[in-house]
Image: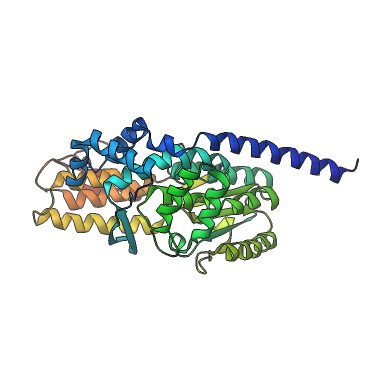
Amino acid sequence: MKSEERRAIRRARREEKRRRKREERARECTLEKVADLNSLYKAQREAARGVGWKASTQRYQWHWLLKIAGARKALLAGEEICRGFHEFDITERGKPRHISSVHFSERVVQKSLTQNVLVPAIVPSLILDNTANIKGRGTAFAIERTKMYLARHYAAHGADGYVLQGDFSNYFGSIPHAGVFDLLERHVTDPGARALARHMVEVQGEVGLGLGSEPNQIYAVSYPNPLDHFIAECCGVGAYVRYMDDFIIIHPDKSDLWAIAAALYDMTRQMGLVFHPKKTHVTKLTRGFVFLKKKFTYDRQTGGVVVRPCRESVTRERRRIKRQAGLVASGKMTAEQLNQAYQSWRGSLTDLNAHRTKLGMDALFASLTHGATGRAAAWPPPDGEMQTGPGGATQAKGASEWTN
């Protein structure tokens, strides 16, 4: 038997094993489980987190037993549960976004569908380095995976190498419904659960998925799954991380990365997706790169991976606290609220190499909040004033030591 034949046999054996596991998972993902009273009760409790102050949420929870009983009856009878959308626009970091929010009663059903059908049926098929919107993963997980891959690359090749960064343009608005239906056809075998999921997609228009819907997050994470497996299994690269519509590929050869980019361009075009022309490029690792609003570089002396907040996020925070300090001065915001907002942002720097950034921001925050009414900020001491010493070190007046 030739080596090619042996590989084909092993491949067929793996595919058969995966098919059996997929069918076993799908057997548990049924409409009956979505409509189960215990599932709906858990879903309404979790859907209310963070929005319990809203009147619509309180009305639902005041009669929660009647509401979930009615939802179960409607689901099993095939009645309409979609009640339209609350549509509005927001601006996130200077970027306008259109949000389509569903009514709370529909959100409960969506959460039950996600927890009992979509997640158990689809998520196990995703690769580990698909890091968004999956329990146990997230931005911190993606950053750690990126650091690990950079460390491995340095151990094998030093700092020589390149990173291909990609970003899909108008990602949610470009996902074709036919692709989502194919995804459901492959992973969800129960006719009732599949019909419910399809209907929730169909009411969103001809193409694209709305922001603000939990099932849409799962579809968006899962839709490029063929690309993930192609890159991880067929391209010969050992370092690939994707977070929703952003991804990076680390490789020592620049020409190989451009060849991969060309192949991905053809695949994504067939899937109805388009790469953002300004955000898809190849960068030398020695220059560093920005991923998930973090700047990744190598330490020039030790080769260790250094992760800092990107300049854009620091600049935005400086402008925000200056603007909010003006609101405190005019009485439209309390000093306690300003302090909480700043400490929340500062906490996001805990696991980063951002000591000097924190010192500079602390000094700015202290200069803006010194003398403000209300509870004193955590930095500096209430009776101190910032002063600068040798080498740019800072301290509050009356403190015993300089801080570098």
- Left or right of 37? Residue 227 is right
Measured as percent of width and height from the top left, residue 380 is found at 21, 42
* Colour mapping: rainbow
The quadrant of the image that shows the N terminus is top right
Q: Nearer the viewer, residue 37 or 179?
A: 37
- Left or right of 206? Residue 153 is right
- Left or right of 128? Residue 259 is right
Measured as percent of width and height from the top left, residue 209 is found at 42, 58
Which residue is at the far top?
Answer: 38
Which residue is at the far front?
Answer: 77
- Left or right of 270? Residue 220 is left
Measured as percent of width and height from the top left, residue 81 is found at 33, 49
Q: Nearer the viewer, residue 149 or 241?
A: 241
Determine the image quadrant of residue 350: top left
Residue at x 63%, y 46% (from the top left corner): 153
Determine the image quadrant of residue 259: bottom right
Which residue is at the far bottom?
Answer: 277
Q: Nearer the viewer, residue 327 or 399?
A: 327
Q: How many marks?
A: 0
The quadrant of the image that shows the C terminus is top left
> Taking the image as drawn, is residue 25 in sight?
yes
> Taking the image as drawn, is residue 293 in sight?
no
Residue 183 vertical position relative to residue 88 in the rendered view, above or below: above
Measured as percent of width and height from the top left, residue 337 is found at 18, 46
